[in-house]
Amino acid sequence: MLQYDVIIIGAGASGLMTAIEASKRSRKVLVLDHANKAGKKILMSGGGRCNFTNMSIDADNYLSRNPHFCKSALSRYSQWDFIAWVERYNIPYHERDHGQLFCDRSAKDILSMLLRECRQYGVSIQLNTAVIRITSITSQNSGFRLETTQGCYVCQSLVIASGGLSIPKMGATPFGYQIATQFSLPIVPTHAGLVPLTWQDCDKQRFAPLSGIAVPAVVRFGNHVFRENMLFTHRGLSGPVILQISSYWRPGESITIDLLPDLDFPYWLQQQQQKRPDSLLITVLAKQLPKKLLKTLLAEDVAGIPLKRLQAVPIQKLAEQLQNWRVKPNATEGYRTAEVTVGGVDCDALSSKTMECKTVPGLYFVGEVVDVSGWLGGYNFQWAWSSGWCAGHYV
């Protein structure tokens, strides 16, 4: 039976980060993963360019039942720390909208950096290994015993970095939640986040032909507001702004969409009336929105009316229709296409300083398996780096 100081289950972003920091402290570290390759989600993220962090990281960019939990980790290992590491490896990167940082070449650069550090500090990574059973060792030395498809192992510290339920085709499983339940840790109910929304059956036939149309929009749900591009698909709505709001949306509720952000629509349309009184409404509106979208949203008799015949009340009604469009989605596309899992191991059961379970000494949870999920834009990777770094200094 092989013995290690630390065993980490999950060779993703948070698991590799934990392994590197623990091994720097001369801990004997083994990383186990049931996949055939380490860092699969790293490689596919950001369209293969890996949106590895964001220039602006704040606790407000995260969802959690305990909104303060992530503050400690994010402040102790910040985006600037990870950026400095990337620069030491001379990995070229660039900034996109909203402070998102991407590799110039490939996500392979980030994974190669992590694996090189693992090799440098003597981390053992064993793939194609499924964990069958975990038991606590109650003898004097304490720790954990793991039965796997490749044999049995013993460790003092056990780190669960197995991720959430998003993108099952990449190997996602509920393993981490099952281990938490085994050790009587509470789980905040999970749902798919950063995921497209689907139409109600009554709306699908009407809006499916708009598939492929993208427009800038402001989308609201409750107190949460995002502005980004919105994409119509044959199944529903997608694009960055929809992915962002999807993490907050709840089934049965409506979202509100402003298709003309920053436009004082009644004033603008009154100006157009004075300049082009004989022009048709749809012709003028086509300067702001795709005509195909307008034909779908507006009644035919309204779309074809000359501007000079428009009165104040219809103008206000149009403004409501285009800038306060209420949509009740049927559902999300689910974990199949979700970029993150919202919910997870309850933060109140963990130390925000170390990621260790308060009731199970030596057991740690890091990354997506914890009830901390970030916005689109590199925030989830930063949580993986930060939480892994914290655990790595204590395991």
Image (cartoon, helix red, strand yellow):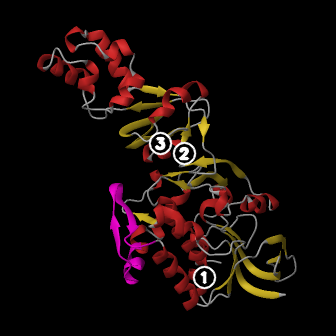
Q: Quadrant of the C terminus?
A: bottom right
Query: Mark 3 and mark 2: span between their CA atoms?
Result: 9 Å
Q: Quadrant of the N terminus?
A: bottom right
339 shown above or below 204: below
User: On the image, numbered disc 2 is attached to which residue?
Assistant: 247
**Which amino acid, mark 2?**
Ser
89 shown above or below 200: below
Judged by depth in the image, the label closer to the viewer, 3 or 2, is 3
Camera sees residue 248:
no
Query: Mark 3 and mark 1: span between their CA atoms?
Result: 38 Å
Position of residue 55 measured from the top left corner of the image (x, y, whole percent): 36, 63
How many residues crowd mark 2 within 10 Å: few (<14), some (14–19), many (20+)?
A: many
Mark positioned earlier in the residue sequence (2 or 1): 1
Is 254 displayed left or right of 301 in the figure? Answer: right
> Which of the 4 quarters of the picture holds residue 225?
top left
Judged by depth in the image, the label closer to the viewer, 2 or 1, is 2
Residue lying at 59% horizontally and 51% vertically, measured from the top left = 337
Mark positioned earlier in the residue sequence (3 or 1): 1
Res 117 label: none
Q: Do residues under tags 3 and 2 come within 8 Å of each other at their CB atoms?
A: no
335 shown above or below 311: below
Judged by depth in the image, the label closer to the viewer, 3 or 1, is 3
**Residues in magenta?**
83-106
User: On the image, numbered disc 3 is attached to which residue?
Assistant: 242
> Is residue 94 inside the magenta stretch?
yes
Position of residue 385 measured from the top left corner of the image (x, y, whole percent): 52, 70
How many residues crowd mark 1 within 10 Å: few (<14), some (14–19), many (20+)?
A: many
User: On the image, numbered disc 1 is attached to which residue?
Assistant: 22
Q: Nearer the viewer, residue 205 or 326?
A: 205
**Which amino acid, mark 3?**
Ile
Which structural element holds mark 2? loop
Query: Mark 2 and mark 1: span between their CA atoms?
Result: 32 Å
